[in-house]
Amino acid sequence: QKSRGGMNGRMAADLGELLVPYMPTIRVPRTGDRVFKSECAFSYDSPESEGGLYVCMNTFLGFGREHVERHYRKTGQSVYMHLKRHVKEKATGAAGGAISRRRNGKVFLDLELNRDFNGDEYDCEDEAKLVIFPDHFEIPLPNIEELPALVTIACDAVLNAASAYKKQEPDSWDEEIQVSKHARSLRQQDNGVRIPPSGWKCQKCEMKENLWLNLSDGAVLCGKWFFDGSGGNGHALDHFKDTNFPLAVKLDNLTPDIADIYSFDEEEAVLDPQISEHLQHFGIDIIPIQRVHNTNGMRPRVSEWEVIQESGMKLKAVYGSGFTGIKNLGNSCYLGTIMQVLFSIPEFQRAYVGNLQRIYDYSPLDPSTDFSTQMAKLGHGLLSGLYSKPPMKSELIEQVMKEEYKPKGISLKMFKALVSNGHPEFSSNRQQDAQKFFLHLINLVERNSVGLENPNNAFRYLVEERVQCCQTQKVRYTQKVDYLMQLPAPIEAASNREELIAYEAKRNEAEENMRAPPEPVRARIPFTACLQAFTEPENVPDFWSSELQAKSAGVKTSRFASFPEYLVVQIKKFTFVVDWVPKKVDLSIDIPDFLDLSRLRGTGLQAGEQELPDLTPPIVLPEDTRGKKGSPEIDESAAMQLAEMGFPLEACRKAIYYTGNMGPEMAFNWIIAHMEEPDFAEPLALPTFMEPGPSVAGSGLAATPLENHPPEESIAILTSMGFPRRHSVQALKATNNNLERALDWIFTHTEREEEEETSDALSDMADTTEPNDSDASGPQIKDGPGRYELFAFISHIGASTMSGHYVCHIKKEGRWVIFNDHKVCLSERPPKDLGYIYFYRRLSSS
């Protein structure tokens, strides 16, 4: 594009004079400013896109060509830096290893390269210029001679700024850990030692944890004071003192991606570029081990990895609307699979993509921090087809025939940074539980949907809980809101139980004799057995009988008080073992395509049943907090110890408090018993002392959040600050009556409130046919028949939710489609029996 007015021959004074009116708006990025040079705030355009990216020289937000005008109109900010990266294939015959030519040197500096491009085969030519709106006057960069000094400094600072997501990216070990001086010259003994894939223990004691393999002679010994803080008896160090064999690798977390290597001689963690060869010397073939962090050293079943991903099959790639992949940012597939499924649901499409223009127009000045904006952006990115285009014919011939064409997909860096902000688990770069993220996202949608259509209505349903006092035989019926059905997987009901028992005996024998374990046997469990286990009564620990006014034995059963439009079913595959890591049980379930749960509908109080008196139990506080004002005393060191295991800090503090500061072990047991409760990670909120009185269960509803009219005292506090009563009630309801969160909610929803009072545009996109089965001020319940059809499922590969990989299959246009990160293909054999989370849609009553 030619610069308007022409740039050739202009004098420095002319350019300086041109920029004078805009100088007060041009800022130099300060420490803490995030510069968005790789992603548009409203779309997935980047400098590699056809129109490039415009970076505002005041806010440092990035905008694609379609959205920069909106930011200019809203803010009046006129000066933008336009960034464009030209990616070109190297000319044939180019000298191997030649340095890529760049038109203006390394212009974008920290800009992330598209990893799909092989740096040896492509040249990147970067281009930057200042653009002044509204006339689109262009000034090529660099232009030191003609630009005012302040503008030059600001431009250099933007071009040199680190990625806006640097703090979300994994730390580079390469800068901290050096290659060992012994790595290349290490001599390994030919002593015939072969290390089995499991059953290790220290050769000098019985320790089975914190074990290190000496890379010289294959000795397996325990550590003591190594950099990871693990305990032990120090036999690995003693062995070095006796033999001078310098290098050892930790066996516990050995994968192709992770190898903790220690040099006793250099007294520090080191790198070994030849670690694969050094391990193969002792029979450890690290290459085929899949990317699953497996703490017991056992290789995951190759069959699971291959079956779930449909490896080895010629899968046909699909492109266009609804077939856009999501790039894996490094252990982010738990997020990608959930979002793929959610945006295949019409309610989510309508709420965010259907309202896209309205959401964008009312977005705050920083759209990167607005949940609705980023949801609309994500939905549009997946459904527009703009980022899922088939290869051109020339590319088909050259790349597809060579199986080299890779669809780009979209990168959710901005979205992940927003939805994980402040969350100790999702803000990390570790793998997470997709089920937990689903509930986390449901909570975010709930908090940000006031004044908008709430797509959560499609998932929300009521659970009827019946608790019976074993001594008096009297019962209490309550209802609570839920979004997900957790289905037990009873191993004892496996159809191949004898085979499993025989395998377990062989495995134990192999472990005792330090031999390789037998081929794993997968449990096959009938789906009917899972449903039966769901309906079985369960004991209620610490049940307080209002009839006896004391603790008593109690049993609970759960049924559906209503059926949701979309039923989410999680198979409880994971169990906690001694090391506190949730391990997956290897099982297969014959999941049906069609499901009828009508017989699980609750019945309410039956003839002949007697209700327990409607009284609340007395509130008993631990001894050390009785009579004290202010916050309860909590052993923060014990809470941190639990938090380091990956549990939310607030949950750990509650666990310490409710177990009377009796230490982390007691608190851990509390965590395991309460971790599936909806307020598990909420801050500790103590009730005030009160006399026993009528409970909310008397209305037939539980205290969670159905009909949770906020306390008048809380409403009074907010209205006394000048907030409207209606807005205060909405804020308290959206945050489960938490005052501090309600205040935060009000400040982030002020525009939405004003807009709600002045606009009726919502009604155009609202689902006018949805039944309103509950009070308009409470959660909306879309009750209907309990007959369903499977339309999506998410599968997990690996031994633990804290590691592994997620893949999802979605039924579209009558065909199953596999979404494996950025790759989207027609599925040949959807592995429905190995799924982790299943999504069903209600069948029409016709």
Image (spheres, rainbow, N blue to C red):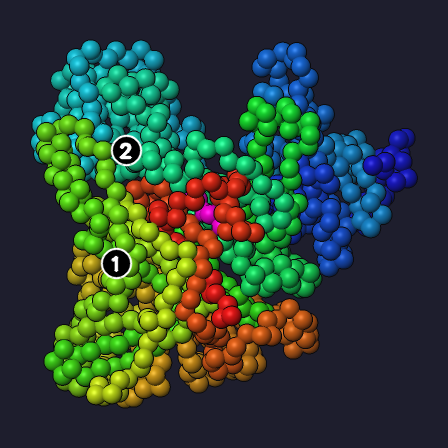
Q: Is residue 345 left or right of residue 522?
A: right
Q: Nearer the viewer, residue 727 or 675?
A: 675
Please report whichever mark, 2 or 1, sits nearer to the chain's N-terminal start. 2
Amino acid type for the residue under numbered disc 1: Ala
Mark 2: give few (<14), some (14-19) or many (20+) Cα within 10 Å. Answer: many
Q: Is residue 142 left or right of residue 611?
A: right
Amino acid type for the residue under numbered disc 2: Arg
**Residue 460 position within the rendered picture, expressed as x and y whole percent measured from the top left:** 44, 69
Q: Is residue 532 above or below residue 503?
A: below
Whole-angstrom CA distance, mark 2 to mark 1, is 29 Å
Label 2 residue SS: loop
Q: Is residue 743 visible?
A: no
The residue carrying mark 1 is 529
* Residue at the front extreme, as displayed: 846
Q: Is residue 583 above or below residue 245?
A: below
Magenta stretch holds residue 182 = no
**Residue 790 position within the rendered picture, expressed as x and y whole percent measured from the top left:** 44, 56
Rendered residue at 19%/32% (across/down): 518
Rendered residue at 35%/25% (across/down): 287
Q: Is residue 181 above or below residue 389?
A: above
Q: Quadrant of the N terminus?
A: top right
Q: Is residue 550 left or right of residue 329?
A: left
Q: Nearer the viewer, mark 2 or mark 1?
A: 1
Q: Nearer the viewer, residue 518 or 244?
A: 518
The quadrant holding residue 766 is bottom right
**Residue 345 position within the rendered picture, expressed as x and y whole percent measured from the top left:** 53, 59
The residue carrying mark 2 is 299
Rendered residue at 61%/21% (across/down): 121
Mark 1: give few (<14), some (14-19) or many (20+) Cα within 10 Å. Answer: some
Q: Is residue 89 visible?
A: yes
Q: Bounds of the magenta span?
A: 806-810
